[in-house]
Image (cartoon, rainbow, N blue to C red):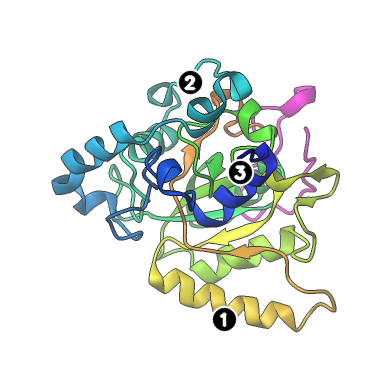
Amino acid sequence: MRVSTLALVTLIGKTGAFATPSARNLIVPATAGRSLFVSATTNNNNNNSKKGRNLVQMNLFKTLFGGLTEPGPRIPYDTLGYPADEMGKLAEEGTVVVNSEKKPNLAAATFAGGCFWGLELAYQRVPGVEYTAVGYTQGPELKPTYNEVCSGATGHTEAVCVYYNPEECSYESLLDTFFQRVDPTTVNGQGNDRGPQYRTGVYPHTPEQMEIAKARFEEEKLQYKRPIASELKEAQVFWPAEKYHQQYLEKGGRFGTPQSTEKGSTETIRCYG
């Protein structure tokens, strides 16, 4: 039986695994056999079993289609600097971070709002947000790269993962930044950036975050005539993006003009630099 690539991608995006027994043997979903809400600070006992699962979990598209997504160099997470290096290590272990390993007082939160450059800068300016990283999430592929995600075939969306101090910054205030930044009624994109890799979403890391986000989504529905298109789903593994994407606008963007990360800054964000 012939199955189109698009059909396979669509099915994977909805279920995380194929429905046929033979295809199901090809990969093990990243969340199989464990709770989604895993704290990096209390997960050491499961490392061996996770490594075993990760050995079984193969690159889906390379397995099925050979050169369809011919891999380039993988992202060397250990060279990215904190917090992206830590996030990369946890992703390779299959861990959805709840608190930073290095700084356990910091909680994690993930948001997708179209191109991740501008959204990252918006969160860098939020008081209580201490660290940010851009990357790829909510897709089944392992260790995705920018070019692979841009193809729209990996199932990931561009996202920002923040480490924030809950004593200084509430999850509600992080949601404020998200809804101030995006049009949640736009399907698969923001502004001029279109495609499933630019879909918007809120991805809670804990049940507490999920309850707060659900209530906020209900409030937001009353503000729009069109239905809310932004996703609200449990966070999956967050794969950090390449080093040149990290804090891109702070470093100057395309035009070499650094933008302010001062807390509380209301300076207009130039999305591409």
The answer to whether marks 1 and 3 mark residues whose Cβ atoms lie closer than 8 Å is no
Residue mark closest to the camera, 2 vs 3: 3
**Residue 232: image tag:** none
Sequence-wise, the earlier of marks 1 and 3 is 3
Where is residue 249 shown, x and y percent of the image? Answer: 69, 34
Where is residue 268 shown, x and y percent of the image? Answer: 80, 48
Query: In what quadrant of the picture does the C terminus appear?
Result: top right
**Between marks 1 and 3, how big is the CA–CA gap?**
34 Å
Q: Which residues are magenta?
A: 250-273
Nearer to me, 71 or 94: 71
| Image: 158 above or below 273 | below
- Which residue is most to the top? 73
Q: Pointer 1: what residue?
A: 215
**Between marks 1 and 2, how big is the CA–CA gap?**
39 Å
Badge 3 marks a residue whose secondary structure is helix
**In the picture provided, is 173 more to the left or to the right than 5?**
left
| Image: 211 above or below 74 | below
**Residue 74: image tag:** 2
Amino acid type at mark 1 = Ala
